[in-house]
Amino acid sequence: MVQETERLIFRKFAPTDLEAVYPIFSSPEVMKYSVTGALDKSGTKERLFEVIKSYQDNGFGKYAVIEKASNLLIGYCGLEKPMEKDFLQPELGYRFVHKSWGKGYATESASAIVETAFQEYKLAEIIGFGEPENVNSIKVLLKVGMCYWKDAKYFNKSVKVFIMTAEDFRKLKK
């Protein structure tokens, strides 16, 4: 697992992160395109423990993203098994507190996770979802080298699905 980038530190989530991650999961603006929407404290705790369990179950998960300059948890980024059975590939996902938007943190962290997915985890392919209106998230997926694959339904929402294979990653790194 990549531990850090120029401006960010990545680490596994711990139960003690509940208070730090609550502003992300409870924000209607940040969670606008999430299948769950904004979560209350109980929902945040449940989601946090699902993320922690993913490390054990899958060998990967979403990681806490710490801004080096402030030493604050500003978001998360990582891979997760999609919650719908129609999709088998690990899903790249990220969310950041609103005040950190527009600083390139999503692209910086997603790039690091993509590299980890193929170089360390040796995955064959990964996917990412973006609702058509979520233009900024789609831009991140494209910037890290993912390609549009297809339109689909994910929890009854229309989404654009992006994909990257290990071969795509190798070509990108040449």
Image (tube, rainbow, N blue to C red):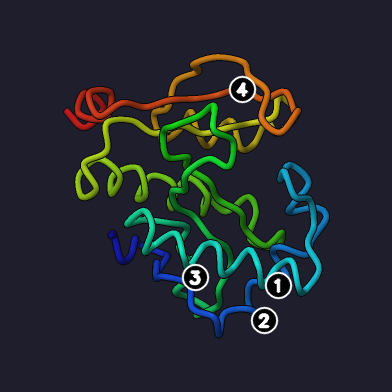
Callout 4 environment at 10 Å: few (<14), some (14 to 19), or many (20+)? some
Along the line of sight, which residue is nearer the eye, 16 or 76? 16
Q: Tag 1: residue type?
A: Tyr
| Disc on the earlier residue, 3 or 1 | 1
Say which quadrant the C terminus sits in.
Answer: top left
* Spatial separation of the CA atoms under disc 1 and disc 4: 28 Å
Q: Quadrant of residue 41?
A: bottom right
* Spatial separation of the CA atoms under disc 3 and disc 2: 16 Å
| Disc on the earlier residue, 3 or 2 | 2
Q: Residue at x 49, y 70 (%)?
A: 67
| Disc on the earlier residue, 4 or 2 | 2
| Disc on the earlier residue, 1 or 4 | 1
Query: Label 4, on which residue?
Result: 160
Query: Label 1, on which residue?
Result: 22
Callout 1 environment at 10 Å: few (<14), some (14 to 19), or many (20+)? some
Query: Label 3, on which residue?
Result: 67
Query: Label 2, on which residue?
Result: 19
Work out whether 8 lies above or below 133. below
Q: Residue furthest bottom?
A: 16
